[in-house]
Image (cartoon, helix red, strand yellow):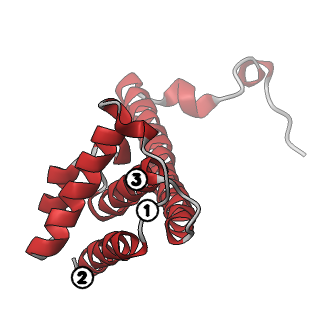
Amino acid sequence: MARCSPASRQFSWPVIRQSRPDVVVSFLKGTAILTWLALMGLRLRRRPDLAAREAARLRREKAAALARLRSAELDHVEFFETAARVAQIETALGTGLNAASIDAGTVRAAAPLSAETAAVIDEVFSSRAELLYAGGGRRDGRVAEPERERVLEALQELEKSHAHH
């Protein structure tokens, strides 16, 4: 078995000792770039997961709100607040916008709607505003069945129009 001389034992990495500094620096730069790209790839891969989770959360909220709208237990304030929220959520799912920032004009512009449905959407948002902010929130009683059906049909058309887009 051959023995190493004491001179060769003092530096254990002869490859680095014999390499040129510019090659070593290029190698380190390349390693840093690859590490950065890998970390960015991980970060970008997580974003769709967040978007998918948010969309799933909005779909669950919309389903619960539609179930509440179908019940005859809601008063006028709750009914129009919930109907407006369903329209906001449906538009957010179709456009990717923040649901809380969506108004009647955005809902109408986001999907092709019939004139009747657009009018119902306007009515939902204006009734909500009137009942909540203009002191009309003390209106007693439940929403009449024909009015409930008209709003539910408009929301159904809105949902279908986003499905076709």
Which residue is label 2 attached to?
A: 164
Q: Residues within 10 Å of mark 3 (few under 14, many from 20)?
A: many
Which residue is label 1 attached to?
A: 143
Q: Are marks 2 and 1 in contact (CB under 8 Å)?
A: no
| Callout in the foreground (3, 2) | 3
Q: Residue at x 57, y 69 (%)?
A: 71
Of helix, strand and loop, which one carries label 3?
helix
- Place of residue 36 in the rendered image (x, y in percent of width and height, measured from the top left): 44, 37
Compare marks 2 and 1 and give the one earlier in the sequence.
Answer: 1
Label 3 to label 2: alpha-carbon separation: 21 Å
- Place of residue 61 in the rendered image (x, y in percent of width and height, measured from the top left): 54, 58
Q: For residue 85, which numbered disc appears in the image?
A: 3
Q: Residue at x 15, y 61 (%)?
A: 108
| Callout in the foreground (1, 3) | 1
**Where is 23 relative to 76, above or below?**
above
Of helix, strand and loop, which one carries label 2?
helix
Residue 100 or residue 118, whichever sits in front = 118
**Where is 82 relative to 2, above or below?**
below
